[in-house]
Each structure stands twice: as structure tokens, then as C-alpha cells.
Amino acid sequence: MEFKKITNKNLWDVVNLQVKENQKKYIATNTVSLLEAYATQNENERVETFAVYEKDILVGFIMINFNVFNWDGAPRVARNNYCIWHFMIDQRYQGKGLGKKALNKLIDYIRTKPLGESEKIYLSYVPGNDWAEKLYKEAGFVSNGEKDGEEIVLVLDLGGENNDR
């Protein structure tokens, strides 16, 4: 598995990736997420976007940020920590273990602290998205009791004290 930066070469292929119809209520489109990444970068915040490839086949899209907490109701854990902001595997490649593989690779990447020093990774998911909840909890994410709007926040401790649980 390989992560490649989003460029003009792969942008439209990433935009065209889709989740299953019954998953669309749980996740923003890749277009919306890329627009949010662009706007956030223009606010001098740290964001990275990646196309996910398995054996040279584009299978997904992920986006992370670091220390971005400039919105009303931002969870406390957002400060000085990484966020998995967008994570999706295209409907054609789901059910093959690629989500788990991509998530583990992403956690390993974040452990290298590419955007800054951090103790935690957090993410949020829409209640009812049982697949996402199961995937994230199997990777070691746990609830810290916070919400991001209506979404449930989960946190993975990268080591050291965990003051947000």
C-alpha cells in the first residue's frame, strides 16, 4: 500500500471515488473534503491529503490535520494533536481489508510526526456508522467522552500521558 500526495495528476480520480449509497450519510464527499483542505491550508493550518493506492490501483482517499481547532465546539483533543479528518475506501474495494491496512499505515505515518509533535490522534464518526466504529476501535481508538457536533470523538494515545480520556 502506498500514499501519494493529491496532485493535478490524480485529483479527478480521487474526486470520482465513491462510498456505497448507504454510507453517503456518514461521510462528506471527497470534493467537499478537498475544498476544506484547500481553505484550511490557506489559513496557514497544517493539512495533508493523500490518495491511497494498492498495487498501483487507486482505492481510497485520506486527509489529516494537526492542531486545527478554530471552529465553535472543537473538541479539546484537537489542540496539539493529529486528526484523521477524512478516511474512505472506494465502494469497489471495500470488504478486502484495505481500510484496516490503510488505517494502520496512516497511524504509522502519523507516529513519525510529519506535521508536529503530538501525543494523540483523534477522529470522529457519525453515530450509526457501525463499520467505521468497529474499524477504529479495533485499531485502538477509544472514546474520550467528547463530541464534534453530533459526531462521536475517538482517540488513540501515541504514548505518554493521556489527559483527554
Image (tube, rainbow, N blue to C red):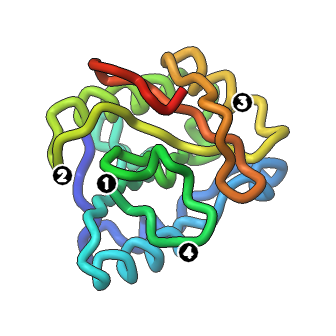
Residue 30 is tagged as none
Q: Tell me how far mark 4 sits from mark 1, CA to CA.
A: 19 Å
Q: Position of residue 132 (x, y in %)?
A: 66, 34
Q: Nearer the viewer's eye, disc 3 or disc 2? A: 2
Q: Secondary structure beneath disc 1?
A: strand
Q: Which amino acid lies under the numbered mark 1 shown in the image of this protein?
A: Phe
Q: Secondary structure beneath disc 4?
A: helix
Q: Tell me how far mark 1 sits from mark 2, CA to CA.
A: 6 Å
- Circles 1 and 2, Cβ within 8 Å, touching? The answer is yes
Q: Residue beneath label 2, please?
A: 115
Q: Residue beneath label 1, please?
A: 66
Sequence-wise, the earlier of marks 4 and 1 is: 4
What residue is at 56 percent from the left and 60 percent from the top?
74
Sequence-wise, the earlier of marks 1 and 2 is: 1
Q: Which amino acid lies under the numbered mark 2 shown in the image of this protein?
A: Leu
Along the viewing direction, whichever of 162 and 150 lies nearer the viewer: 162
- Circles 1 and 3, Cβ within 8 Å, touching? The answer is no
- Circles 4 and 3, Cβ within 8 Å, touching? The answer is no
Sequence-wise, the earlier of marks 4 and 2 is: 4
Q: Residue beneath label 3, please?
A: 131
Along the viewing direction, whichever of 58 and 4 lies nearer the viewer: 4
Sequence-wise, the earlier of marks 3 and 2 is: 2
Q: Tell me how far mark 4 sits from mark 3, CA to CA.
A: 22 Å
- Circles 4 and 1, Cβ within 8 Å, touching? The answer is no
Q: Nearer the viewer's eye, disc 4 or disc 2? A: 2
